[in-house]
Image: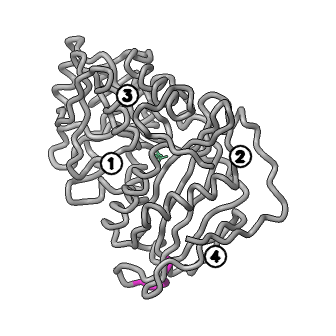
Amino acid sequence: MEIRFEQRQNLKEKPNMNELGFGKYYTDHMFMVDWIEGKGFVDPRIIPYGPIEFDPASLVLHYAQETFEGMKAYKTEDGRILLFRPDMNAKRFQTSNERLCMPTVPVEDFIQAVHELVKKEASWIPTNPGTSLYIRPFMFAYQPKLGVHAASHYKFMVILSPVGSYYKEGLKPVSIYVEDQLVRAVKGGTGFAKCGGNYASSILAQMKAEEMGYSQVLWLDGVEHKYVEEVGTMNAMFVIDGKIVTAPLEGSVLPGVTRDSMIQVLKSKGYTVEERKLSIDELIEAAKNGKLTEAFGTGTAAVISPIGKLAYKDEIFFDNNKIGEISQMLYDTLTGIQTGKIEDTFGWTYEVK
Ligand code: COI
């Protein structure tokens, strides 16, 4: 793919890299390519970051035909730029797009778009501990039409944002409310796809949790409201009797890149990982008899988010306000590999040259 480049006239002032927050600042340029039925991908370009114009009848605004990805770029101490397993994001983007009846971007084109944009914006990659350049590839339908059907016109875009930690708590443990009414996904729906609609429908539960003084929710399965699935916008893992238990990928859970990486790290260090159904009753029981020693969420944005408190139907059944040994080891190992501080024996890092 030949990407044309249009330079921004006045470069932006960089934010204070010590106070980035999450998704507050965007770099000077963005990537964009259109997909038009009968023509395919048209005019890939890196252009100045800014508002874009599209018709009020654009399908995405009405029926949410949209997918996205989340990735990060890091600068190593010796100045190299590393991405983490970009091929996995590219493949998941294809899976999501297939589910939403949208065109799929070839893996090499997805990686090239990210690569070229990150290379141009290298001066925006923050280097303080815990910071990175968050990469948000996304696609949406912009054909103006009000009939519910797959669109004939899409834009695939990539934007970049220098970020600190996703949760204001950083790596400090968060408190979680187990949501027993609202559900995130069911098998056969879009739970395994990364589409905006999944996140829009999660906001109500998130708000309810916040009103009660919790940071996030733990989702139960959508059929029986019995099995734990995800935590907020992350995959969830629990250390029970020394074994790590996480929900299986059976259609309602997002196949997280961080989830997969942590499972591989854990297995390489001799831990037993069980991808299986875990009922809320079993979890409460394990907490009550002291077998539940750690709980945490995993995702690109937060990397790892230790769970300090778990409440179900107004009862706090897990209260352990510290970062567990396994959580800390996973955080150190993963961020060590991502930032080039630890040797990458898995072959996960990809250098942007
Ligand atoms: C990520 O972890 O990258 C995500 O996509 C979660 C998010 C909605 C910020």
Element carrying mark 4 = loop
Image: 236 above or below 266: below
Q: What amino acid does circle 3 point to?
A: Phe
Q: Quadrant of residue 197?
A: bottom left
Q: Are marks 1 and 3 in contact (CB under 8 Å)?
A: no
Crowding near pointer 3: few (<14 within 10 Å), some, many (20+)? many
Distance, label 1 to label 3, CA atoms, is 16 Å
User: What residue is disc 4 on?
Assistant: 53
Is residue 107 found left or right of 188 in the rendered image? right
Q: Quadrant of residue 10?
A: bottom right
Element carrying mark 3 = strand
User: What residue is disc 2 on?
Assistant: 124
Query: Which sits earlier in the primary sequence, circle 1 or circle 2?
Result: 2
Crowding near pointer 1: few (<14 within 10 Å), some, many (20+)? many
Query: Which sits earlier in the primary sequence, circle 4 or circle 2?
Result: 4
Principal SS element in the magenta part?
loop
Distance, label 4 to label 1, CA atoms, is 31 Å
Q: What amino acid does circle 2 point to?
A: Trp
Q: Are marks 1 and 2 in contact (CB under 8 Å)?
A: no
**Residue at 35% over, 38% down:** 259
Q: What amino acid does circle 1 point to?
A: Leu
The answer to which of 153 and 45 lies nearer the viewer is 45
Crowding near pointer 4: few (<14 within 10 Å), some, many (20+)? few
- Could you say where residue 218 lies in the image, as x and y percent from the top left? 33, 36
Q: What amino acid does circle 4 point to?
A: Glu
User: What residue is disc 1 on?
Assistant: 254
User: What residue is disc 3 on?
Assistant: 296
The answer to which of 174 and 28 lies nearer the viewer is 28
- Could you say where residue 228 lies in the image, as x and y percent from the top left? 24, 37
Number of the front mark, 4 or 1: 1
